[in-house]
Structure formats: structure tokens, C-alpha cells
Image (cartoon, rainbow, N blue to C red):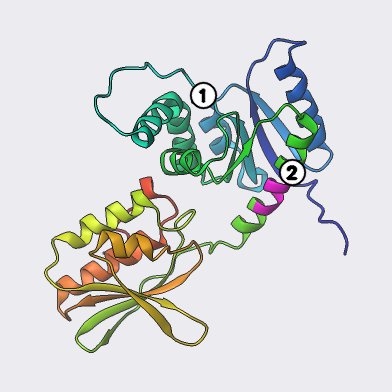
Amino acid sequence: MKPRNTKHKRILFVYRDFPAGTPGYEATVCIVESLKEKYDITTYCNLDEKVIELVTSVPSDQRFCAMVTNVPYKPSAGRPMGAVGRHMRETIELSESYQDSLLILRQIKLAGDIPIIAYTGAGDSSLVANIFWEIGGVDHIVPKTIDAQKDSEDICRALEKIIQDYEKLPSAIPEPILETEGGYTKVKVRVNLNGGLGLASAGVILKECGAYRGDVLLKRIGDTKEIETHDVKSALDLLSAAISEGEKITIFVEGLDEKAKILAKRLYSAFSCRYPFAINMERFI
């Protein structure tokens, strides 16, 4: 099998301003030079609002295929939190430390919908991954180590996978096609949510369904038929469904009137969005 030719793919690499001669500087040079062997690399120093303009101002035929970035942080203020559990404390401290950088990445996502790889010393635990994804829309994390060559290889592997994944995404979301079955309004949808259904997107969907008087269900679509029914109004049932990105599901809203049709369309919109912080329920109303 021939190796994929990725030299024509443009990658934006955003690095920190390490002083020359320091380990951070040497590692950055090593990684950039390694990436240049496979990709067309553009570098930019420090993650700030100007990166948004850089991503969105290029002509469509010169768009970046992905972005690799350091994620600067500021130490948590260490304020008193009262009687909160360890997990909650870690979540709050991590969110506060990286919030400024992640909000910039969120703006980049909303403006350019570019795949983002975070190259960070925060690690890649599930806690870090969830915070980076739900606040900043980060698609993949490469943990920073003391071995720059290994990090280069990890970044290259992540780039290849993430670019392939984005190329498989539908270029446009089709209009929902509503059907009826046994007193329910139903609609089939491909789940486009980045990383699948998470806490943030589930929260939006639960809130949307909470005021509706009838049942709201979803069924996975298997190879030939619908399987596994879940209650969309139940937080436990919805989250335990573990709906993944790329899955196809059918949403059932009890009722055949206009309210049922509107809710079905709004849920179709939610599941077909890319990011939990950019869910737009009004797209097909």
C-alpha cells in the first residue's frame, strides 16, 4: 500500500513563545521540522484572538485542514470551595486554568470548524478530554512528554486520523423527513455531535424535552432494523445509551400535532449539530 500523500495539506501549528535554547524551544523546533516532512506547515506564536482571523481570512482553496496548538493556562486561584468532592474540585480548577485558551478555541471552531489537536501538558485523562471538548471543541489531545520525537510521531498519527474523520463528515445537513408510526412523530438522524452525546449536549436535549407532556424516545438503527429503545426525558437513560458520533438513530415524539412535529425537528437539529456549545434548535423550524 502506498503511503498517503499529505504534503499538500495545510496545517496551522500554534506554539508558545519559549526563549531560545530552552527545552521548550528545542522541542517546538523538532516538532515543526518533523511535521514539515509530511505537511504544509504554517506557524503562529501564541494562542490569541488573531488566530481566529488567520483561520477565517484564507481563501477557500487554501484552508487549513487542521490546527495543532499549545494550550496556555493560568494557575487556579485556589479559592475556597467549601465541602465539594475531589472530582468536582479538580473539574473547577482545570476549567478555570484553561478557560481563556479554550474559549479562543471555541471561537475558532464556530468561525472555521477546523479540526483541533491540543498538544498539552495537562494530560489526556477523561476529565481533561471532556473539559477541552465541551468548552473548546478540541477534537484530540496529544499529551506533552520529554521526548519531542515521540510527541512528533503522536501528533502526525493524530493528524492523519482527524483529517480522515473530517473528510467523512456530511458537507450539508439534509432537511428532516418526518414520518408517523403508532401515534408518534418520528425522524431519522445521523449523530454529528463531536465525540458523541456528552453531558453538555445531553443537558440541552433534556431541557428541550422537559416541558413536553408526551413521551420522547430514541432507537438506535442497526444494520437492518431499529434496536435499543431509550427514554430521552430520562437523564440516566439518555446518558447510559452512550450515543456515538456517526451513529444513526430514530427519534420518536408522542403525538401527531404541530407541537410534536416541531419538537422532532428541534431534536433532529440538536443531534445533527457538531458542537454542544453551538447547538441551534431553530435550523429547520
Badge 2 marks a residue whose secondary structure is: helix
Q: Give the number of the disc on residue 48.
A: 1
Q: Which residues are magenta?
A: 156-161
Tag 2: residue type?
Cys
Whether residue 125 appears in magenta in the rendering, the answer is: no
Q: Is there a contact, CB below 8 Å, between mark 1 and mark 2?
A: no
Which percent across, then down, holds residue 181?
A: 26, 88
Which percent across, then down, holds residue 101?
A: 48, 28
Q: On the image, which quarter does residue 72 sit in?
A: top right
Q: Nearer the viewer, residue 159 or 144?
A: 144
Q: Nearer the viewer, residue 248 or 40?
A: 248
- Nearer mark to the viewer, of 1 and 2: 2
Dominant SS of magenta comes to helix
Q: Nearer the viewer, residue 268 or 26?
A: 26
Instruction: Name the quarter where the C terminus is drawn.
Output: bottom left
Badge 1 marks a residue whose secondary structure is: loop
Q: Nearer the viewer, residue 220 or 263?
A: 220
Please name the residue that numbered disc 2 is placed on: 156
